[in-house]
Structure formats: C-alpha cells, structure tokens
Image (tube, helix red, strand yellow):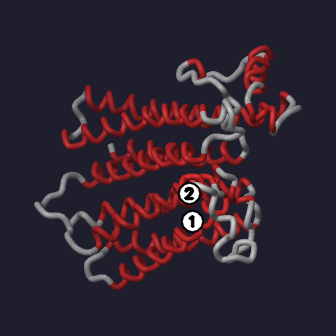
Amino acid sequence: MATWLACVALLVLAMVVVGGATRLTGSGLSITEWKPISGVLPPLSDEAWRKLFTLYQATPQYRQINAGMSLADFKSIFWWEWTHRLLGRIVGAAFAIPFIVFLATRNIPARLIWRCAILLILGGLQGLVGWWMVQSGLDKRVSVAPERLAIHLGLALILYGALIWTAMEAWSGQARDRGQLRTAWRPVAILFAGAVFTQCLLGALVAGNQAGLVYNDWPLMNGWFFPPGYGAGSFWGTVAHSQAAVQFNHRMAAYAVVIGAVGIAGAGLNSRILMGQSRALALAAGVVAVLQALLGVVTLISRVPLPLAMLHQLGAAILLAIAVALAWRVRRA
C-alpha cells in the first residue's frame, strides 16, 4: 500500500508541474468543454481539430490576445492542457482501481480505509474545481481567475501531502506504543508545513496575475523595498489581483520560509531528540528551502522562462513533501 500511495503522489506531482506549464504557456483555456470520459481521446481528424479551434476562437482570450492564431499554434497549446487533463484521469484510475482491489481482497488495514476514502473524494473534487477554474476564463476574462487557480493548486497540494502522509502511515505500520513524540518539534514542524503550503498558494497568485513579468529586479522592486503600486482599491483586489502586492507577499513569505527552514536545520543538527530520518529531513528542509529561494530569484530576474518556472514549481512541491514528511516523522516516538 505504501508503494502504491507513493506512486500516486508522484503522479500528482507530475500533474502539478504540468499544470504550472499549462498556466505559463497560456494553454489552460484551449479546451473549452469538460468531458470526463470522452475527452480522454484527442482530436483524431481535421474536422475534430477545426471544431475545437472554432470553440476556442469564441473565447475572450483568443479575441483579445491570440487573434489570428493558426491551427498549428492552437495545437501547441492544446497538447499542454490535454496532457494535464489526461494526467488527472490517470491519477484517478491509479488510485481508485487499486483501492477497490485492496478493499475486495481485504488487504487494507481498517485504520487506513477511511483515510483512502477521503483521498478518493479529494481527487474527485479536484476535477470539479479544475473545471470551475477554467470556466472563469471562458466568458469575460482572458485568463483564469487567480484566486480560483490558487484554490485548484491548493487542493492538489493537499491531496499530494495527504498521500505522502498516508504512505508513511502504511509503510511504518500502526504505532507500537501509546504516546506520540510530545516536544516542541511537533508544532514547529506543523507550522513549517503550513508556511510552505501558504507560500505555494501565494506563488499561484503570482502566476495567475502574471506578476513574475514585472518588478524583475532583486532584492528591491524597481528600486523600492515596498512597491508604490501595492494597493488596488479593495482588500481583495489588493491581495488577489494586484501584481505588486502578490509579488511582494510572495517575496516576504519566501524570506520567512527560508529563515524557518534554516533554523529547523540548525536545531535538528544539534537536537538530542531528532535522530535518523527526522534529523535528515530537518537538514533537507534547510538545504532545499535555500536552493528554492535562489532558484526563485533567478527565475524572476530572467523574466520567468518556462524551464526555470517549471523547475521552481517542482522545487516548491519537493519542499512541501519534505515538510509533510518531517511533520509526520516527529509525531512518532
């Protein structure tokens, strides 16, 4: 079961990275219909391609940004979105089919049944949220709503983290003693995982607002520490839709995460409580957080080239996996 859950987590990781590429290439609105079953097949004829292209031509994104796009150019963005949706279907099948087999053969511990049932529900909900996100860009907007993008990514990361947590539960078996490790490390590890998760959501708002294409200097923002264009009227308009605000918030949260991660790494090396895997995870959190921050700076000043942006999103997911694994590990005596 642990191997199965870990493999599904890797599939979700791949889906997150491809989803980031889909957003960065402007491909997310190329498929304007949601067909969970029949949509698994790509267009197989010239007529089918022309039909899909005609549907895309009716979107604001095409009329305002991509007017005059050729069918060949449309195919290039279509394949990103189709691959992203295909991965979603593969994740669903890779989880649901073995889960049913485990249940039918009674090869799943009772303590893990309810956990896996929740994971299955989360996976189905993720598909619905994905389509809800896409709908936001088919009527009046030329891209999906940033807040819906953040919710879509956040739910994917919750599923990803829960898969890792449950895989570790399956691998290690039920705790053989009554207590759990009740030290200051438990709240610290949980708080760190929450901070990394929040930082990922802030990154989604940066991507959703294309805020990585402005303020491409560092450590200042066009010569300012606090950008003058931070406010955007309302509180929600500022937090979710101001390019200056979302990038500034992402930067400040990154500094906090790095400081916390380095602190955890240093404390872990000097701790008499953390041993073995826990100490290795604490050290890994510090190293990966620093590398991830440096990669973020390089990505920003390079004006977000696709390979670096995908690598940055992959790094965020890896750091979250380390944080979740550490939070789980320090609970065990």
Q: Is residue 296 left or right of residue 73?
A: left
Reply above or below: 223 against 151.
below
Q: Is residue 277 visible?
A: no
Say which of 292 and 274 sits in front: 292
User: Which element is circle 2 on?
Assistant: helix
One can see residue 263 in this view? yes
Residue with the mark numbered 1: 249
- Mark-to-mark CA distance, 1 and 2: 9 Å
Vertical order, 319 against 259 (above or below) = above
Secondary structure type for disc 1: helix
Q: Residue furthest front?
A: 233
Question: Where the C terminus falls, by quadrant?
Answer: bottom left
Residue extending farthest bottom? 270
x 84%, y 31%: residue: 72
Residue placed under numbered mark 2 in the picture? 239
Residue occupying the point 26% across, 75% down: 184
Residue that appears at 74% across and 33% down: 60
Instruction: Answer with the quarter of the image where residue 116 lies.
Output: top left
> Looking at the rendering, in which quadrant would you find the N terminus?
top left
Residue 179, x across and y down, in percent:
13, 63
Q: Quadrant of residue 131?
A: top right
Which of the two discs, 1 and 2, sits closer to the camera?
2
Q: Earlier in the sequence, mark 1 or mark 2?
A: 2
For residue 281, the mark is none
Q: Residues within 10 Å of mark 2 (few under 14, many from 20)?
A: some
Choose between 122 and 166: the one closer to the eye: 122
Find the residue positioned furthest to the left. 178
The picture places residue 264, in percent across and down from the top left corner, at 40, 76
Do the residues bearing badges 1 and 2 touch, measured as CB atoms within 8 Å?
yes
What type is the residue that disc 1 sits on? Asn
Kindly identify the residue that appears in the image at 44 percent across and 42 percent down.
8
